[in-house]
Amino acid sequence: MLIDRESWPLHRNWAILFVLGTVGSLVWYIVACFDAVDWPGGSSLPGFTFGIVGGVIILFEMVLWLRRKVRTWRVGSAQSWLRAHIWLGLLSLPLLILHSGLRFGGTLTTTLMILFILVIASGIWGLTLQNLLPRMKVDETPGETTYVAMEQVVGQLLTEGDELIASVCGAKPDAAGEEQGDAGVPVIVGVGRRSATMRPAGVIAETEPLAEFYREQVVPFLREGTALDSPLANPGTAGVVFQNLKARLPAAAHDVVDALADLCDLRRQWDREARLQFWLHNWLWVHYPLSVALVVLMIVHVVTALKYW
Amino acid sequence: MPRLALDCHKQVDEIHAWKERIGAAALVVCIVWVAANFAFSEQRDFHASRGPVAGVHQMWETQCNACHTPFAPIRSHSWQALFLGDVQASSQKCQTCHEGTTHHAGQHPELSCASCHREHRGRDASLVRLTDRDCTQCHNDLAGHHAKKPAFELTVSRFSAQGHPEFRSIKNDPGKLKFNHELHLRAGMAPGTGGGALMTLGKIPEPLRKRYRDQQSTKHDDAPVQLQCASCHQLDAGDLGLPGTRSAGAYMLPIAYENHCQACHPLTIERKGPDGLLTIPHRLEPNLIHDLMFNHFTAQAVRGQPGLLDRKVDRVLPGKLTNALDTTLREVIDKNVEHAEKDLYLSNRLCAECHYFDGKPVPQAVQAGKRPELQTAPTKVPPVWLQHAKFNHTAHRAMECAACHEAASRSKTHTDVLIPGRDNCVQCHGPTTSAGTPGARFACTQCHQYHNGDHAAQGIGAARRNPRAGHAIDAWIQAK
């Protein structure tokens, strides 16, 4: 979720709620301190209230998971839920710190507080990444595709490469793209590129080096991407390699070489996109399971705290 | 151009798939841990503790029910006490070991133990060193927290010149024992311009002389005796070599004639006779002293006329006076006794030097042949002056005595109260200020004890604090 100047009007009310909630709870707590012999904890009236509100917020935060599971659920847009998730989650931090009476307490409450802080910290980390990485994706991967369909579109790249080489060299090199599955009716999305649009006039003579280069260098790279120790993994060395290839081919085949270079460039972008996607979402590996643990232990805490006021 | 399947959005990528797997694992681990803890652990609620209990209670650290009554607030101050359970139920558990006493019968609200004694604050936390707030919540407005009009200061906000009243127990000296501090602190107790012999070390009987010699720099027998404060005021810490184990020396031992006066003030009556001096035991009342002296002088008279022992004894008929010889000897004896009694009660040298007497005025009370109609007035010197607070002399031993009792060296009468008051204490005990208060501890509990607090010299071993019944070891361990 982006929080920037453009989207700020959508966040403003939530931010005001967060500030008012924080300041209001602080004021109430400070007033209660004047009448207490110790930092008011969870059993004090403000502490108990903060605990109730904080607990309800935590439960609400978990409902976001349910909201995403049931996308047809007509209870506000996913964006609205996410905004509420962010700002209420932030509000729960001061509330539950005040609820704790500024103490970690025993084993359970210490565990709860550590979990809670980790959940909040991972959430803030995730929010930060989600504000930075999408911009990097736009800048660095203009050929961005859908991450979940990455395997499928890589197969399509191979198919396009195979067809191009076959049309120029006169025969399919190894039918490399056949196994990748050319799924049904194609849907055309994304930026245009030469491999998909160029239509070579026909077979070009003396293009054996091209077919060999495609088979030995390009196909493995398109399959494995930058994980492969290939000169094509680096834009600089790839440029040199393709220049050398052109020098060994007739001028009529140079456009085909450029089209292959485009395919390799696209493969590099998708690898980059995959890495950015990984960092864009891997914080959830911390945020989500710790949230689950937090809710379970919070329930235990509520029961035992009520038992031993 | 890339071509995507229409249903690709339904696919779950690996990142989110792993998120779900880890989340499910976390859920299972937590539920299993909680269930296992509940099912198998005898200390299932222990993990819910808000912190370690104090060292004195660590034996019951894992037995929440030893102190808590489930679903009942343990502190009277809890707002939920208005709605839930019996607040005093947990206090009753405390009182199986700590009987305590009621602070004031008319106080309200009646506080539960945990209202002031807050637990779960760590092994080394003190349960009795309370915050001032615990006390001032009532004492800052005592009228509002007492069923009747309280006989105490109505507003005490903190220990300071403004917030705390002067110590009540030093308003006057209830003592009935004559003493001149100024004279006794003079070298040789020089009686002033009127003359009089100096008290020298040589005049002190030999067995007691060493003690006084050791206290002063000039040690020869002609040296005047120079008393220090500590010559008489000694801590209850074994300095006197008295039998038995002594306490840590919080308070001064009561002044005892035998320990502190006798060396210079022997109770000897000097009457000529074959038996020489008669020493009167201390603490005898005048009528018993009369009998003692009568017996002494009778024996002396008999020994002075040995023929009396060989004289035939006349039969004494009922209602008939004894013969003239007895009457004559009695006159001698009675005269000796009368002289001795006047020495004791009128001379300002023996008993009357220190004591007051109840009964008839002394001149009329002492008559020949009669027991004096006198009783020694109780001395009533308070063994502990600050009766509603505790004080520890040992904690203040770095100070010189005069730092607090500076008037002692000028005091000529026992009616002077030489115990320092509040203003003396606040010189050190108060918050650190730029004005120079050094910031010694000044919390209420520094001096006051809540339970049994009107007995300053009684510690936690006082019988009033004992539990109602003792415990067997097993019951004790299991907090039953």
Image (cartoon, coloured by chain):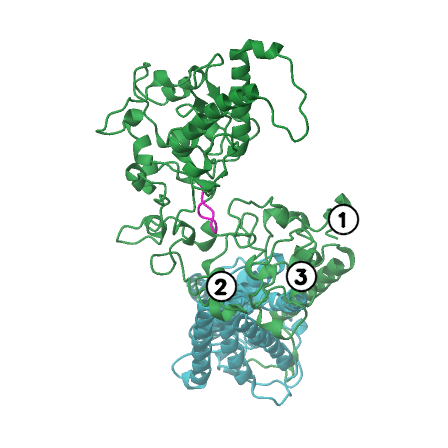
CA separation, marks 2 and 1? Answer: 35 Å
Label 3 is found on which chain of the structure? B
**Helix, strand or loop for disc 1:** helix
B33 vs A270, left or right, is right
Residue at the image position 78 percent from the left and 59 percent from the top: B39
Residue A276 visible? The answer is no
Image quarter in which the N terminus of chain B is found: bottom right
Tell me which amino acid carries mark 1: Ala
Q: Nearer the viewer, residue B384 or A97?
A: B384
Q: Is residue B226 above or below residue B372?
A: above
Q: Nearer the viewer, residue A19 or B471?
A: B471
What main secondary structure does the magenta stretch of the protein show? loop
CA separation, marks 3 and 2? Answer: 22 Å
Residue at the image position 53 percent from the left and 26 percent from the top: B242
Instruction: Count residues near mark 2 (Cα–Cα under 10 Å), then give few for <14, some for 14-19, many for 20+.
Output: many
The residue singled out by tag 3 in the image is B90
Q: Position of residue B59 (x, y in %)?
A: 67, 47
Q: Quadrant of residue B9?
A: bottom right
Tell me which amino acid carries mark 2: Trp
Tell me which amino acid carries mark 3: Ser
Q: What's the magenta region?
A: B385-392
Rendered shade, chain A? cyan
Q: Position of residue A210 (x, y in %)?
A: 52, 67
Of badges 3 and 2, nearer the viewer stands 3
Q: Which chain is green?
A: B
Residue B355 visible? The answer is yes
The residue singled out by tag 1 in the image is B475
Q: Nearer the viewer, residue B248 or B333?
A: B333
A275 vs B70, left or right, is left
Q: Is residue B314 above or below residue B119?
A: above
The residue singled out by tag 2 in the image is A39
